């Protein structure tokens, strides 16, 4: 908890705030495919949202995810391809709106949109007619000008 507070304070300094960017998107049902199976899509190529998706190499410093699912086994998370591994956000089951998660002391990890992929991974069932989820990515330029 203290690390998150410190990370947030570091990101809120004037120098850091000038270099902090975000990209947000929300997904209602439909168009979500709710068939009970695992689904995923490429965040860069298959959606549009508010803010600016990174166009050059950046450092992803945090995420916020939320969901509105009727059933506790439905979930949503954001994943990344190698070399960064998978699951850059927490899994959100059922209905939840956790606070933003900032990576260790606001350091984050490198993301190059030309080499790497971020994907939304979720499952929902057909009976959930109002399933929805969303997210925000927080990032900084890799080499601020």
Image (spheres, helix red, strand yellow):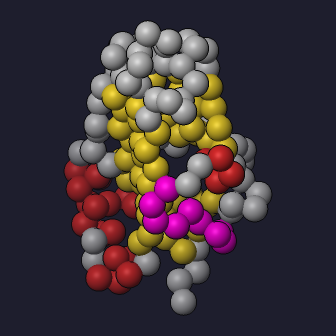
Q: Is residue 80 visible?
A: no
Residue 125 highlighted magenta (yes or no): no
Q: Which residues are magenta?
A: 49-57
59 vs 13, left or right, is right
- Residue 42: name its quadrant: top right
For residue 81, above or below residue 126:
below
Question: Horizontal and vertical percent for residue 93?
Answer: 38, 22
Q: Dividing the picture into quarters, in which one does residue 22 lie?
A: bottom left
Which percent across, then down, holds residue 14? 29, 82
**In magenta segment, residue 55:** yes
Looking at the image, is 72 positioned above or below residue 76?
above
Q: Which residue is depicted at the point 41% across and 19% down?
A: 129
Give the residue at x 56% y 54%. 48
Image quarter (top left, top right, bottom left or bottom right) of the C terminus: bottom right
| Quadrant of the drawing holding the N terminus | top left
Q: Main secondary structure of the magenta part?
A: loop
| Nearer the observer, 52 or 91 | 52
Residue 141: percent from left, percent from top: 54, 74
Q: Residue at x 58, y 74 (%)?
A: 142
Residue 110's place in the image compared with 142, above or below, is above
Q: Quick check: can you spot residue 99?
A: yes
Q: Is residue 114 left or right of residue 68?
A: right
Q: Give coordinates of residue 124: x percent, y percent.
A: 49, 18
Residue at left offset 61%, top offset 20%: 38
Report the residue that reaches farthest toward the bottom: 145
Rendering quarter of residue 85:
top right
């Amino acid at each position: 908890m203290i690390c998150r507070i410190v990370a947030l304070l570091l990101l809120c300094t004037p120098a850091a705030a000038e270099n902090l960017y975000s990209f947000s998107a929300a997904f209602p049902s439909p168009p979500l495919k709710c068939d009970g199976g695992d689904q995923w899509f490429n965040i860069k190529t298959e959606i549009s949202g508010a803010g600016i998706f990174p166009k050059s190499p950046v450092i992803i410093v945090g995420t916020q995810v939320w969901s509105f699912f009727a059933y506790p086994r439905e979930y949503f998370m954001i994943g990344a391809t190698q070399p960064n591994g998978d699951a850059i956000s927490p899994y959100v089951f059922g209905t939840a709106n956790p606070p933003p998660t900032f990576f260790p002391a606001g350091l984050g990890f490198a993301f190059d949109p030309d080499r790497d992929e971020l994907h939304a991974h979720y499952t929902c069932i057909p009976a959930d007619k109002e399933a929805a989820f969303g997210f925000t990515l927080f990032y900084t330029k890799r080499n601020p000008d």
